Image: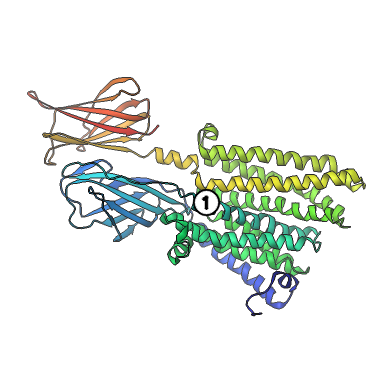
Amino acid sequence: MSRGVLPVPLLLKLNSGRWRIFALSTLLCLLAIWPALVGQASAHASLVSVDPADGAMVETAPPGFSLTFSEPTSPLVIKLLRPDGGSDVLSDITLQGSTLRIAAPDNLGNGTYVLNWRIVAQDGHPVGGSSIFSIGAPSTPPQIADEIDWPVRMAIWASKVALYIGLFFGIGGAFFVRWFGSGSPQLRPVLAGSILAGLAGAFLSVGLQGLDALGAPISSLGAGLFWQTGLGTSFGNTVLIAVPALLAGLCALSSGSLWNRFLAMAAMIGVGLALGSSGHASAASPQWLTAPAVFVHAVCIAFWAGALLPLRVAFASASPAAVSTLQRFSRIIPYALVPLLASGLFLAVIQLGRVDALWATAYGNVLLAKLALLGFLSGAAAYNRYRLTNKVTQGNLTATASLRKSLRCEIVLVVAILAVAAVWRFTPPPRALDEAAAMPAYAHVHSAEAMADITLTPGRAGPIDASIVIMTADFGPLDAKELQVRFMNEAAGIDAITRSAVKPGDGTWRVDDLTLPVGGHWSIRLDILVSDFELLKLDGAIDLRK
């Protein structure tokens, strides 16, 4: 047997100075890296602007492109799709603040191009998008394939559930055993198995995160590039904290001592730090509230879930300490439930932003499913505490049998809740969707005599500000006397909405009192009065989000 690898039974029996040194090192590492990791988290990234603008027509090939996001990002893959169906991977990229500047390839001819990007935001989630522009004259845009890779997605979900089991049942159980007792010999292999499942989930999730970030199939999991990419995201920060915490929890399962209590406490802190270092909730604003809320929420879940396996095993094995352990847990659990519910409610309000997002978004649907399961779990817990606990302490055998069944039911419900919560990995929160919906919509219209760039802010149905730049056919300035804009949506049965634009003096024309009531495809007509004897007409279209 090599000295570097120890079997689990032997590991659980060790209580040497080596593990005490490891425990102290683990805690110091956690405390050292946390401030840096908290400083890196921020809001879900959204595109602010792209140059050339989406739908733009440029006279000559641009020397480069730029993508500006709402926060600094890291590029993963940026491609330029050519009119003939070919593509170029753009690798000459520099980051200036929140802007990615990309050098354009040589020999770009006339036609319509698609700039396709995949970046990773500071909350650890990959973000993709594309922008269409034309050089000289438009052509048929190249097609972009955007399919869900279900094997990768299911593997990410499964690894996340495994990580949750290790953090909540494994570490939570180790903490409960060390601080509340009921550490029967039958329990330790169960908790150790939960922690090992968490370690496996943490390890695999790094490579899977890299696959998802780069859009690669699961068959590529063995390549080092994807592991490096996954570790480079903010989810890598979660893994770097979770793994020492899981190992500390595993060591805390050895024979009882003050050091093992210390390890269990450090591991419990690691649960909150790990889940607070990445993800939608921890990245939301205001971070000085959301990050601590995630920490509190995670630790309280671990305390509640971690107590279930020890209690279940204690009563199943008729442990003499089962009743006293149940009494201690019954007294302390309300102090965990109040911050658990308060932090969860706060995070839900932050993430949803509006009530209708509960049923109108996928994120809200997942939350509803989680709340439904939580309702059943809370009912079972209340039944245990207020109907069974007193009878069990009095030696009622029927109540004890009912408690064993109820604890098993609670464990199943917690696993179901964790499985549902893992789906959030694939559902951007409504606040992020609202940020994206606030982004402008662009259109370029042209004729043989003139052209115009139109920007609608925000690019969704409702009140909108329109900004219009009109030019001659050779991209020169066009000095017009008047500009009238008409919007029509035949599919929605909306006839022309006509507005006169004003010129504030910055070279643009504006329409500030515009409301487009529905999303979808809108036709645009610009009537440009150049002189008393010359009227130019431009026809085009623009798509609005709903």
Picture quarter with the C terminus:
top left
- As drawn, the residue found furthest toward the front would be 219
Relative to 60, is 524 on the left or the right?
right
- Residue 285 in view in this figure: no
Q: Residues within 10 Å of mark 1 (few under 14, many from 20)?
A: many
Residue drawn at point x = 66 percent, y = 63 percent:
266
Quadrant in which the N terminus appears: bottom right
Q: In the current view of this chain or complex, which residue is farthest to the left?
A: 533
Viewer-proximal residue among 270 and 399: 399
Taking the image as drawn, is residue 240 in sight? yes
**Is residue 199 or residue 145 the one in the foreground?**
145
Question: Where residue 33 sits in the image (x, y, percent)?
Answer: 54, 65
Color theme of the render = rainbow
Residue 274 locus on image (x, y percent): 58, 58
Instruction: Tell me where residue 202 sits by quadrant.
Output: bottom right
Looking at this view, name the residue that lies furthest to the right: 395
Residue 486 placed where, x, y %? 25, 25
Residue 38 rendering spot, x and y as whole percentages: 52, 57
Q: Quadrant of residue 345?
A: top right
Q: Considering only vertical position in the picture, is 519 above or below 272?
A: above
Residue in the picture at 73% in, 67% down = 260
Q: For numbered disc 1, what is the local secondary structure?
A: loop
Q: Which residue is mark 1?
A: 279
Taking the spot 84% from the left edge, 43% from the top edge, the residue there is 402
Left or right of 512? Residue 414 is right
Give amino acid for label 1. Gly
